[in-house]
Image (spheres, grey):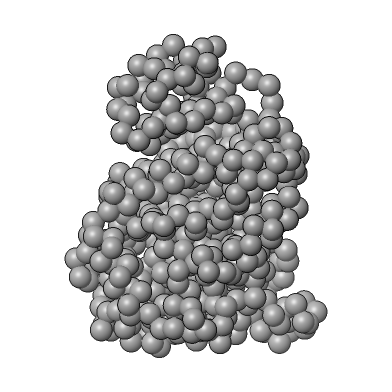
Amino acid sequence: MKIKLILSSIIIIVLTSTTAYARCVEQQEYKVLFKENTSVQAQRQLLKNSNITDEINEIGYYKIESVNINKIKRSSLIKSVEKSCKSSNVEIEKPLYNVQHASLLNNKGFETFWDKQWDMKQVTNNGKSYMAYTATKKTSIAIVDSGIDPKHIELKDSILPGSKNFVPKGGYNNEEDETGEINDIKDKMGHGTAVAGQITAMKNMKGIAPGIGVRSYRVFGQKSAKAEWITKAIVQAAKDDNDIINLSFGQYLMKNGSFSDGTNDNIAFQAYQKAINYAYKKGSIVVSAAGNDTINTNSQKELYNHLNEILKDKFIKKSGKIYDVPNNFSKVVSVGGTDPDKNLSDFSNYGPKAFKITAPAGTTKSLNNLSLEKFIERKLYEKEWIFSTAPNNSYQYYYGNSFAAPKVSGGLALIIDKYNYHDKPNKAIRKLFSNSDVKNHYKYLNIYKALK
């Protein structure tokens, strides 16, 4: 069968995630977080006279409308209560450039795009890992992202039953064309489809774990995701018994302190942490991408300045501790990006706690030193960016730590699959780390060493 595949527009994408805010409005809606080990029955009893508008009872998180909030605050079962504003959201940046590429690639059967995948060659020892072990669908990766193209030739045979949509009707602040249907996982941004290609592509290109099982947990509409959607998806992915949960995004959250409207990110921070701890206890490993903001995350000053710069409707009035979430949490395998020379990518966050392992993410050095026209003319994207899947059965070039994280997710999944480390996250992580290379004091993914 002749398959016609188009290498579509070259997209230069800043695949970082930023935190944006909207002003707190006067209302009687509150976020409530219960203490650990509070039973669902006790939670419900305390909130019986309140209107519950959203909940993740597995971690004791609720949104409620209540006129008796002071009584709830005084309860010994409560850890935190705060006014529910239009909450912080996660954004994946829109493309900066969209340059049409003239190449039309006609492929028969399994003709390969391998020559375009310098990144996969590095982490698989030039493809030897594929011969060392073949993935099965007994192991699954939850891709919490913008959805997936379920008909893509590279991905369709890897998608397991059980994918879910967490974007509600109306989308972000009721500003998007979203139905809220639980089965609506169609990718409207392209990001989730590209991430999936790095994990499980198996036809004309290769993911790190071709054919491994994946599920899509859609939390982005056309633009943004709310923190509670992501938290809910993490919990559900763990309940669905996924071995790995991939998060190719993050947020800068300020715990304690206050913004100009008197709020902070304390409950969002704690809910994230509780969701990740819940997943770990269920046997799921959470993998996340470090930020792409060239920030030393060990420096509160740099984090403070960056967060203040990106705030839209408010500013930091009283500074609290700022964290790059979820990378900050101990139970997370956080991933930084590297360039073709295995040096840290020029855009990657850095510092002692910025990440735990690295994998190829590309570089923007040549792009920054040349005009866009010369960069494209010399086809430097082929040498410096990441080739991956895109919606509508197509492919694109990308860069960003979003494409380092799924390589590590796929690597961990292969280890779990081969050595039967299901529900043994510590063993899988140790196996991956102990078989990594070391470059400039950073661990660097080498899945072949872990599998051979």
Q: Residue at x 38, y 60 (%)?
A: 156
Question: Which quadrant of the structure image shows residue 120?
Answer: bottom left
Q: Residue at x 52, y 37 (%)?
A: 267
Question: Which quadrant of the structure image shows residue 16?
Answer: bottom right
In front here: 58 or 362?
58
Q: What x and y, as percent, mark residue 19? A: 64, 49
Quadrant (top left/top right/bottom left/bottom right) for the C terminus: bottom left
* Number of marks: 0
Q: Residue at x 80, y 79 (%)?
A: 371
> Does residue 8 show up?
no
In front here: 57 or 133?
57
Q: What x and y, as percent, mark residue 85? A: 63, 30
The answer to whether 439 is drawn above or below residue 28 in the figure is below
Residue 354 is left or right of residue 1, and the answer is: right
Residue 399 is left or right of residue 63, and the answer is: right
Q: Residue at x 72, y 78 (%)?
A: 367
In front here: 438 or 186?
438
Quadrant (top left/top right/bottom left/bottom right) for the N terminus: bottom left
In front here: 287 or 175?
287
> Does residue 428 show up?
yes
The answer to whether 133 is drawn above or below residue 92 in the figure is below
The answer to whether 427 is drawn above or below residue 282 in the figure is below
The outermost residue toward the left is 420
